[in-house]
Amino acid sequence: MSDDNSGVRLAKRVAELKACSRAEAERYIEGGWVSVNGAVVELPQHRVGEADEVTLAADARATMLPPVTVMWHKPVGVRCDIEQAPKAEWLAAEHRSADDRSKQRLLLKHWTGLRCAAPLDTAASGLVVFTQEGGIWRRLVDDAITVEHELWVDVKGVVAPGALAALQRQVRASVNRQNEAGTRLRVATKGLRKGQLGVWCEAAGIQPDAVHRARLGRLALGTLAVGQWRLMMGYERF
């Protein structure tokens, strides 16, 4: 049944079926435990008629959904700003990493208040963080000056010692590997703002061919392939 004014709210039907409060019924629904005619429905306000079959999963739990934090490998060319909500295609189920050990389903309720706490320049790739958690937000935004960023900066050709020294006057930088074809620099700095690395490189006479954020605080991108995402585990800390 469509969400029109006919029938009754799904939360009311579930409350009757489970002999529970309306608040508990809403938690069952928002937790992804309720199906209508075989399809999971996560909206308590969804309306159902007498002919609609409403069922609950055998292991249904009326617990509050914990807030989530999402780690995403942003591709080059995608714009993602501070406080921006993720687009649905970025966190589509098919892009979820097989290495995600959280086992938590990403539900509609998790999209409420999910916002970017660690953006990247559009031309860069690497670790981006979306969160619902106030503690994570304070750590990455309010206390950003204390959080270290590790980035790989790829440059065509050899970086001259003088250019590297000029960059090192602004930020911790070292050569990771170098040959005639190109150089990879490792850059580590705290409180990095969007566009800041580009300013430092330009001042040093270095033209980045690619920039990649590999680590934020204590958490590395790990096995996340480009475009993939995973949920942050409860024991992990930035």
Image (cartoon, grey):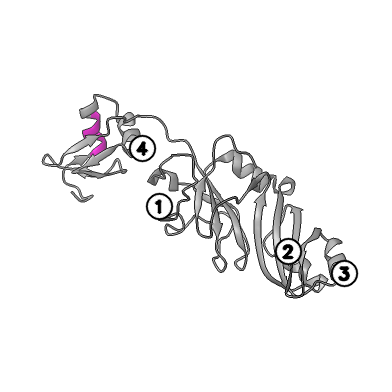
Please state which of residues 178 and 161 is positioned toward the viewer in this rendering. Answer: 178
Marked residue nearer the N-terminal end (4 or 3): 4
Q: What residue do we see at 69% from left, 65% from top?
A: 195
Marked residue nearer the N-terminal end (3 or 1): 1
Q: What residue do we see at 87% from left, 65% from top?
A: 165
Distance between mark 4 and mark 3 Cα atoms:
57 Å
Distance between mark 2 and mark 3 Cα atoms:
18 Å
Image location of residue 79, percent across then percent down: 55, 65
User: Farthest residue toward the front?
Assistant: 179
Is 23 situated above or below 119? above
Q: What residue do we see at 60% from left, 58% from top?
A: 126
Image location of residue 71, percent across then percent down: 55, 49
The secondary structure type at the circle numbered 1 is helix
Pointer 4 local density, CA inside 10 Å: few below 14, some 14–19, many at least 20:
many
User: Farthest residue toward the left?
Assistant: 51
Tag in front: 1 or 4: 1
Q: Which residue is tagged 1?
A: 93
Please state which of residues 31 and 225 is positioned toward the viewer in this rendering. Answer: 225
The secondary structure type at the circle numbered 2 is helix
Marked residue nearer the N-terminal end (2 or 1): 1
The secondary structure type at the circle numbered 3 is helix
Is 102 situated above or below 160? above
Confirm or deny contact between disc 2 and disc 1 (CB under 8 A).
no
The range drawn in magenta is: 10-15
**Three-letter residue code for mark 2:** Leu
Image location of residue 173, percent across then percent down: 80, 59
The secondary structure type at the circle numbered 4 is loop
Pointer 1 local density, CA inside 10 Å: few below 14, some 14–19, many at least 20:
few
Q: Is residue 31 left or right of residue 71?
A: left
Confirm or deny contact between disc 2 and disc 3 (CB under 8 A).
no
Mark on residue 31? 4
